Image (cartoon, coloured by chain):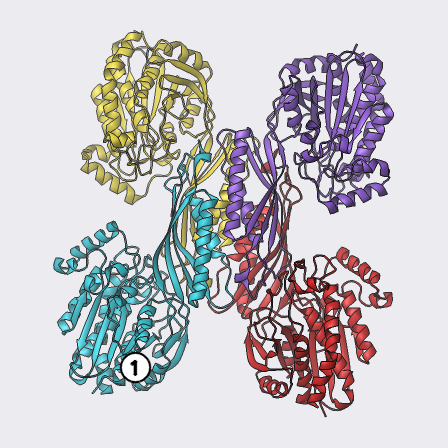
Chain colours: A yellow, B cyan, C red, D purple
Amino acid sequence: MMDAFDSFIHGLKPQLVSWRRELHQQPELGFLEYQTTYKIGRELESLGFKIHVGRDAVKSESRYGVPGDQETQEAEKRALEHGVPSEWLERMTGGHTGVVAQWDTGKEGPHLAFRIDIDALPILEASDHGHFPYDHHFHSEQTGVMHACGHDGHTTIGLGLAHLIAHFQDQLIGRFTLLFQPAEEGGRGAKAMVDQGWLDDVDQFYSGHIGINPLPVGTIAATTQGFLASSKWNVTFRGQSSHAGMKPEDGRNALLAAATAATQLHAIPRHSEGVSRVNVGKLTAGNGRNIIADHGYLEIETRGESKAINQFMQKEAKRILTASASLYDVSVEIDFVGETEPMHCDDSLISSIENQCKESTWIAHIDPVAHVSGSEDASFMMNAVQANGGKATYMLFGTSLPANHHSPSFDFEEDVLPVALAAYAHTLRGGNVQ
Amino acid sequence: MMDAFDSFIHGLKPQLVSWRRELHQQPELGFLEYQTTYKIGRELESLGFKIHVGRDAVKSESRYGVPGDQETQEAEKRALEHGVPSEWLERMTGGHTGVVAQWDTGKEGPHLAFRIDIDALPILEASDHGHFPYDHHFHSEQTGVMHACGHDGHTTIGLGLAHLIAHFQDQLIGRFTLLFQPAEEGGRGAKAMVDQGWLDDVDQFYSGHIGINPLPVGTIAATTQGFLASSKWNVTFRGQSSHAGMKPEDGRNALLAAATAATQLHAIPRHSEGVSRVNVGKLTAGNGRNIIADHGYLEIETRGESKAINQFMQKEAKRILTASASLYDVSVEIDFVGETEPMHCDDSLISSIENQCKESTWIAHIDPVAHVSGSEDASFMMNAVQANGGKATYMLFGTSLPANHHSPSFDFEEDVLPVALAAYAHTLRGGNVQ
Amino acid sequence: MMDAFDSFIHGLKPQLVSWRRELHQQPELGFLEYQTTYKIGRELESLGFKIHVGRDAVKSESRYGVPGDQETQEAEKRALEHGVPSEWLERMTGGHTGVVAQWDTGKEGPHLAFRIDIDALPILEASDHGHFPYDHHFHSEQTGVMHACGHDGHTTIGLGLAHLIAHFQDQLIGRFTLLFQPAEEGGRGAKAMVDQGWLDDVDQFYSGHIGINPLPVGTIAATTQGFLASSKWNVTFRGQSSHAGMKPEDGRNALLAAATAATQLHAIPRHSEGVSRVNVGKLTAGNGRNIIADHGYLEIETRGESKAINQFMQKEAKRILTASASLYDVSVEIDFVGETEPMHCDDSLISSIENQCKESTWIAHIDPVAHVSGSEDASFMMNAVQANGGKATYMLFGTSLPANHHSPSFDFEEDVLPVALAAYAHTLRGGNVQ
Amino acid sequence: MMDAFDSFIHGLKPQLVSWRRELHQQPELGFLEYQTTYKIGRELESLGFKIHVGRDAVKSESRYGVPGDQETQEAEKRALEHGVPSEWLERMTGGHTGVVAQWDTGKEGPHLAFRIDIDALPILEASDHGHFPYDHHFHSEQTGVMHACGHDGHTTIGLGLAHLIAHFQDQLIGRFTLLFQPAEEGGRGAKAMVDQGWLDDVDQFYSGHIGINPLPVGTIAATTQGFLASSKWNVTFRGQSSHAGMKPEDGRNALLAAATAATQLHAIPRHSEGVSRVNVGKLTAGNGRNIIADHGYLEIETRGESKAINQFMQKEAKRILTASASLYDVSVEIDFVGETEPMHCDDSLISSIENQCKESTWIAHIDPVAHVSGSEDASFMMNAVQANGGKATYMLFGTSLPANHHSPSFDFEEDVLPVALAAYAHTLRGGNVQ
């Protein structure tokens, strides 16, 4: 049995690399993954999965931080130009992306769910020699957007898992749900899948990430600790423009309000009870050099090791934003656009994962737990599964990284793809193989 | 004679209003005034002026702050779509806009130059009831660009002056140069016309502005005092991106460098020897909420009542920009993109203007001098004319203003248009009428 | 007559230098001028002036910014130790300093008032070779207090004027009031003398300053323009201390509130209608390195060319102080401790001063007007005199300055002392000499 | 045996309370503990300990952050006035405080060292009803200095331990060293005792703290985890004063440099590898309201869970301080005045402490480990002992706290005193009792 999985993966490896590079070349931002959704949906449909696309996959009003009309429409136009059929696009318009794919063996057995995140980041990819995707001609074709967090790899692994399930269907029992989730960046998409009910009767939930910690290819971590609660806000300051030379005293300076808020937010005190984070990742303000700026805009996030710490960060941040507006006599509007929860992997899955995965020739070493400090909206899914009595984990798949996640030179070793696929595949042996 | 000028203007008034509204509807940013240049050039050519367009009118390398290729090409494409013939566009591509129009009577007499600025501002025009251009359906058709400083009026006055000169050509002596200058905002276009040599043998130079000070329609100021020396810079900070949750300590935060620089620049000490100004009018930084920003960008200006005061401001600003970069361990690049000089009107023109203009029925009152505090790159032209022994002035043309210059609700009374035209026209009587 | 004044001053010159050096050595802060008041009072009483000391000279409740009990009592103790008789001290306790000295010739004639400021500054005097008072052994004996604004010179000139009046008493007519005012620094003492009624029937008011502008010894200015309205505040922030290592999140940081307020105050926009100023001159906050600071304290001032501009500055400053407190969730208390008004010298005094002073051999040159930009609470006196129909001026007395006013190396040429005395003395000839 | 210790402590309890209140009433800052040192030294000498006082106890040049001459001399004068004999004072002048007390039983056995910190903090003690020391009339008699960290309790426990050792001397074996350390606050005194050699041959080292974590009286922690590496700096900015009204542009503003540094330091990024801290606990700048401040002074500290993290904090802080100076064109001087190391208790002591202490009737519960996040210069002693092969721990002694450590209302339950003494006493049973 085991040999069969491993050797199937061996045969699939060139296809994995090929998928990954195609995906890397066409990165799409969260809730704009029209081409990616189509690519996944078409593939899984042809394999025999029952698929739920776009508006069916996500609960529309549970999405956080959907892009504005202009951006959405441009992405839809581009999707059409890139060959997405209009009947597919109609199921997705207005930022309804993602695919939920179900496979029911018809035989009694556990219900396993795998979550795969598919979105990219607003980063201009490096175009230097030495950057592997550039040297091998598959760097981003969409200027300013980049798979700089490895979700191209994740999507590839999900496609591979779907092929494996379809291939070995006769030997499997129970049910499988593959959640190809949009908009993981910013913690915006997971809750919309949870609220659509897909996790309601899941027995075991698996998700994971390539990279994150510096582990070699072949090493995986069965569970992770340390993902942070987080909240994401967009903030708009509105003041009064005026001619900066002739009437400086008549302006109410929204640029300086935004700038002051940015520095002050980063000075929120550290918290003695655990990890906290704050970041102002984007600031735009003002129109022209000689005009007192009448608007300022921030994209910020806070994080905390616990919900309580993150609530402390949010309380501080709100007061600082309001006071910064007051410093410059401008107004402020704070929009909540995303969140993640703290999450805790079930320790009981560790031995099960160890037992199955140690048999794989792809997997050299299994760490029981890895310590991390990002945020993940898989937390909504894990907490939902666990609330219903299921078990959940979030794994890591080792690869060296030439640069940090979210940096223009991010890349990973493609050899991690079969390893991660093997890890997911062997979990089936815990109860879903006859 | 005088009656003839005034009554000609009376007949031209509906045309003035019509020109103004067409121009207001199609505002163009500095060095992108392709449609405006074509409109002016075609009109003056048809009147019999010798015209010099675009690359002929401005010295290419003396332009400050020319927009980037993408913005330029988009504007050129738009110009073609709006009917600018390609043979005209070829003379202007790459941000070479503006028209110099010459009329030589062939008779001995003074050489008069009039400078007309034609560019608009990056401001989203108000679309409220009560905003005259909106209520009368001639507000900007180009979103985010607006004639919010009255240059649509100035261009109209220049067109009117050209018609008047052509109409009364038989009664005139001497020579006339009309400089339809691009990119006054930011102090970017005047020097490029000066360096092309158009001001080399000018005897009298006239320019002016509608509005600025709260004078009623019918009142003009013969001279102005207080225009400030200024300098304009674009500033780029470059740092290192990193995942804000997982590796905050690895980022070098260009957003906070830019934000800190902005607040610190506004705290440059006041100067005891005269007026100073500083403004950060635009700030953009960062790509995404959870990424430490690796770039920040500022558009700033400094001003001073004298060159020495502005140099003090520049010295302070440079140190602050460099130190702000150092605070966050990022690099900084400072690009000089525009400047104006202090300027001094010739008092000797006051009595001459008073004597001519008091005869006009359009002009109710003439202030000898108005006190202002903006900046004008007409200063380069005035200083060039005066350096060659000519006389120069910068006038004001009164109108009430519902909102400050450079604000989204800026507007002026259209009755100022014939008044300003009358003021320019009557100056001809000082020596250029037989 | 004139020769008599000039030669009397010639004879007095060594005494002037001696007084100045004694005063320089014993500088006293505003409302703590116990020794200085005694020295002046005793001297003028012995000359035959009718003197009003301390509590009689100033209206107690009209004083701004009186030092606290501890500081006051220390100064009183020091005064006793330095030989101020207890019966004198009793008239002054609790910060009631200053002397008003009156001389009535008994003959009909104008009532002239001269205002002399007597206080020093909280500055540690330079002790470098090259600093004249140090090299000549008369630098401050009170560490951290210094006559760094020339009020030792002013007091000397006042003493000289008193001697001259007493000496020439038989030749004089009318009345003379010499106001030796405490606490000019900070605009704290003048109003208290005005409110006591001393200026109610004054025909001509004279005050002045040595230095300020770079004029040579022998040159005086008959009037000044540009003294600014000003307001002075003490600001206290109160937060919550906490251990910075163990519970940083429990602190409410008053130090950072004060620090942020300081930088933000300096960024108040410049005003297009005239000169403005703001300064945070002192900041103290916190107790210990590892404790979140629970208090912060600022001493600030704002200035404006007009009352309206200063009111703009005050409005901005109040909002900034309140918002800075809010940024850090601390409270703020704003105490008003001093003010000055704009002031305008009577032009009509220029010719009179020129006519008298040009006859003096001490005075080489008279500028009709000098342009300055400080603040002076003599403004309260001038405005009071002018409101009652009197005339007033504020003069300058030229001297080179090795360093700016209010710097540790401030000093002046002692030759200015007879010049300034001559200027005051010769004004008597405008109507008070038989 | 055990009963004997516990009942001795029972009898000593009123004395413990009495010592604690006397000490609380006479708090002394670090390296100024003249009265405290004398009180301890005299007491232990009378018990028969061999004592080493002041200059003998600490290595003079290894002390960090010794107060200035003026402060030191005032404290010495006060000590004389409070009855410290001059022959004792001579051993301590110039900030050489602390006592090392040795007891050698003459019998073979382990060498135990106990560290007791004795200094107070620059905090104005609360004088409210409800504050126990105020209600019971033993609050601080020295305004602005307070035992707000419980070192009065520590000193009391040390005195009690000395009495116990002396009382039970016949039953003890081995050697005992009691280190009454000055200047724990700021991490300034421990290294000076280490460098004097007192820890060179210690087998077991014990120190501890009352409070810190919210444990009930009767509960102790055998070890602690989480004490942070730290560094302490004094920072001086020097600029140029100038009159803020007349010559603002001539000033170089050291107040704003200090204020900017303060806010910027608090914005140093959090570190993904562990706990970090930064605090600016004190800021003083400027002399007078209308003078541009020519000096600014900060007292700051950084902390890190590891040496590497604290080095990151130090690197950031240095750059920020230098760049803040550069922002305002002022100079900066950074003085290193204290440090602590990370420290790790020996797990092997846990069972030994548990075994001995569980027998005491004073001790209800023993936590094996407590998690904390302050800094302790006991780290130098622990690391020295461990480097020589000894064992070391730092314990906690539970008490409720009405307010945080280092706050004006700090207090503890006096019932913790016998508990802590019992904990130390029972450790003797691990090998030092016959």
Seen in the picture, residue C247 relative to B296 is either above or below; the reply is above
Which residue is found at the position 31% from the left and 66% from the top? B132
| Closer to us: D101 or A260 | D101
Q: Quadrant of the C terminus of chain C?
A: bottom right
Identify the image quadrant of residue C21.
bottom right
Q: Is residue B346 left or right of residue B85?
A: right
**Residue D112 pos. (x, y %):** 73, 18
Q: How many marks?
A: 1
**Residue A69 pos. (x, y %):** 29, 44
Q: Is residue A255 left or right of residue C428?
A: left
Question: How packed is label 1: few (under 14 Cα within 10 Å), some, or many (20 or more)?
Answer: many
**Residue C132 pos. (x, y %):** 67, 65
Which residue is found at the position 40% from the left and 38% from the top? B240
**Residue D376 pos. (x, y %):** 65, 30
Q: Is residue A36 visible?
A: no
Identify the image quadrant of residue C226.
bottom right
Dot 1 amino acid type: Trp
Q: Is residue D178 left or right of residue D307?
A: right
Look at mark 1 in the image and give the residue it sits on: B362
Seen in the picture, residue D209 relative to C307 is either above or below; the reply is above
Identify the image quadrant of residue B29.
bottom left
Q: Chain of mark 1?
A: B
Which residue is the extreme one toward the bottom? C434
Q: Is residue D313 visible?
A: yes
Q: Quadrant of the N terminus of chain C?
A: bottom right
Seen in the picture, residue A396 relative to C81 is either above or below; the reply is above
| Closer to us: B199 or A346 | B199
Which residue is found at the position 81% from the left and 19% from the top? D165
| Closer to us: D420 or D412 | D420
| Closer to us: A174 or D354 | D354
